[in-house]
Image (cartoon, rainbow, N blue to C red):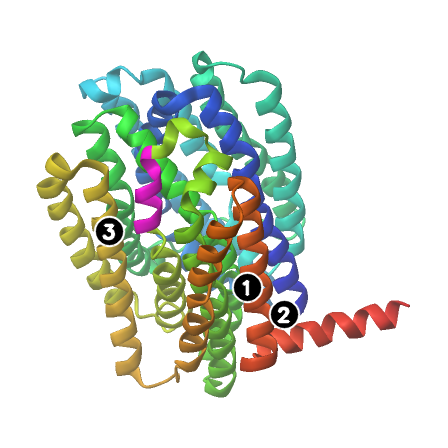
Amino acid sequence: MLKKNILFNLILSVSQVLFPLIIFPYASRVLEPQGIGSVAFIDSITSIFLLVAYLGIPIYGVREISKVKDSPSKLNDLYGELIIIHFASTLLLGIIYLGSSFVFSALIVHRNLIYIGLCTLIFNVFITEWFFQGIEDFSYITKRTLLIRIVFIVLLYTFVKSKEDTLLYYGLMSLSFLFNALFNYLHARKQVKISFKNINLKRHLKPLLTILGSNLAISIYLLIDTTVLGLLKGEVIVGYYSTAVKITKISITLITALGIVLIPQISKAFSESNFKRVNELIDKSINYTSTLAVPICFGIIITAPFLVDIIVGPKFHESILLIRVLAAITVIIGFTNVFAWQILTPLGKDKIIFTIVTVGMIINLSLNLAIVPFFSALGATIINVFTEAFVMLMTFYNVRKLNIVSINYRYLIDAVIGSLFFIPIKFVFNYFVLNSFLQNILTVLCCAAFYAIYQIFFVKNELITSSLLNVKSKLFASS
């Protein structure tokens, strides 16, 4: 079951990497920096309202659903209670969101985009992804997501043709939320019924508000940079910055893919005090994160100009330096995901996470207001990396204090040593190959081949070798 879930989530994560690579090059060239900047600015505000309306349900829901998934009556009660709470919070936040478009001058000019964002906010109530993750129905999640993404791509290339289609582009993004909501609602009805008999909303409020506090603080330090840049520096600068963030974060879905599958398993193991199983799962996660995140970080740094030219075009060359600085967050966020969401959250240490991210939010907000007016997008980029690193180190410190799980640092050291060889490989191809496109393609292929050989034959990475043996056995079995 675990292997199948990992496979489905890996397929989903690969699609999350490929999807922006198909969408963003086209959208950025058609809408140009100003159009992309407008959507990024309003979408950052919409995301804040989405997060507050969620009240921490995505994390809390997965954790609690995984505990009661074998008890239909408890599952029905929990599902219904969380839906009611989410609906009530969305109604309140929707009114505030709509009202803000009539008050703030920076939003008044984008009121039509705000209306679309409001639709996204409403549709999100019925997406209930936390339910399907909690019951570990990753097969359905993957198939549904792939279908909707294919439809979105077809609609985008068919209807978005010029920079005047910014509204339509954001509308298609909202439409994908509607499709997700409809599919999820119909599929959930087969497995759970909303029960109003034994409603007890109060029992959820305290843990939800604690998680909300953490998520809100996280969202502020993730989105405040875009918002501050939009207010102080304009849409074009936001376009450069948001492009750098998007390109850098494309790979993070792959890096955190395993964690999404492991969280229900780890929560169950912790609830049963099965610490041996917990350590096995965390060891796999640390290995996976180190082995994947570090080479991706180095790869982004050495190929940043190529990535910009291929994905968004020469009009976004201002994003190159930003991408190189932001590359570090691929590793940082990968480990934060392990320490915070795979260890501290299943243990119910929501208050610790809340404290850490609140301090991180204050640091981020203060530095953005102080530095962005003078150093623009580069300042926001450095602050982003600094804040993420602070949160990662503090979550790591608290995990060490608990003394429940053991961390194998060798995975990280091996990954760094192997990835350092990418630098001389890049220099060799720069010197001997004049064609820029061929130079970068050969660099990527050679670095990937070298790293794979290094991990398999020199490090003898158990995660990779066991995966290869598993694939080999299945191939021979099928033949």
Measure the C-alpha gap from mark 3 to mark 1: 25 Å
Q: Is residue 460 visible?
A: no
Residue sitting at 29 percent across and 73 percent down?
A: 396
Name the spot of residue 341 as percent of width and height, x first. Answer: 39, 64
Residue at the disc numbered 3 = 217
Q: Residues within 10 Å of mark 1 (few under 14, many from 20)?
A: many
Chain part drawn in magenta = 318-325
Measure the C-alpha gap from mark 1 to mark 2: 8 Å
Callout 3 secondary element: helix
User: In screen coordinates, is 322 left or right of 87?
Assistant: left
- Asked whether residue 319 is drawn in magenta, I would say yes
Q: Where residue 406 is drawn, which disc sits there?
A: none
Earlier residue among tags 1 and 2: 2
The answer to whether the residues at label 2 and label 3 have Cβ atoms under 8 Å apart is no
Name the spot of residue 417 as percent of width and height, x first. Answer: 42, 73
User: In screen coordinates, is 117 left or right of 477?
Assistant: left
Residue at the disc numbered 1 = 261
Q: Residues within 10 Å of mark 2 (few under 14, many from 20)?
A: few
Q: Is residue 89 above or below residue 268?
A: above
Q: Which of the 4 image quarters holds residue 135? A: bottom right
Q: Is residue 316 above or below residue 331?
A: above
The answer to whether the residues at label 3 and label 1 have Cβ atoms under 8 Å apart is no
- Asked whether residue 275 is drawn in magenta, I would say no
Q: In which quadrant will I find the N terminus?
A: bottom right
Residue sitting nearer the eye, 240 or 431: 431
The answer to whether the residues at label 1 and label 2 have Cβ atoms under 8 Å apart is yes
Q: Is residue 474 visible?
A: yes
Q: Which of the 4 image quarters holds residue 245? A: top left
Residue at the disc numbered 2 = 2
Q: Looking at the picture, which amino acid does disc 3 mark?
A: Ala
Q: Is residue 302 above or below residue 94?
A: below
Q: Looking at the picture, which amino acid does disc 1 mark?
A: Val
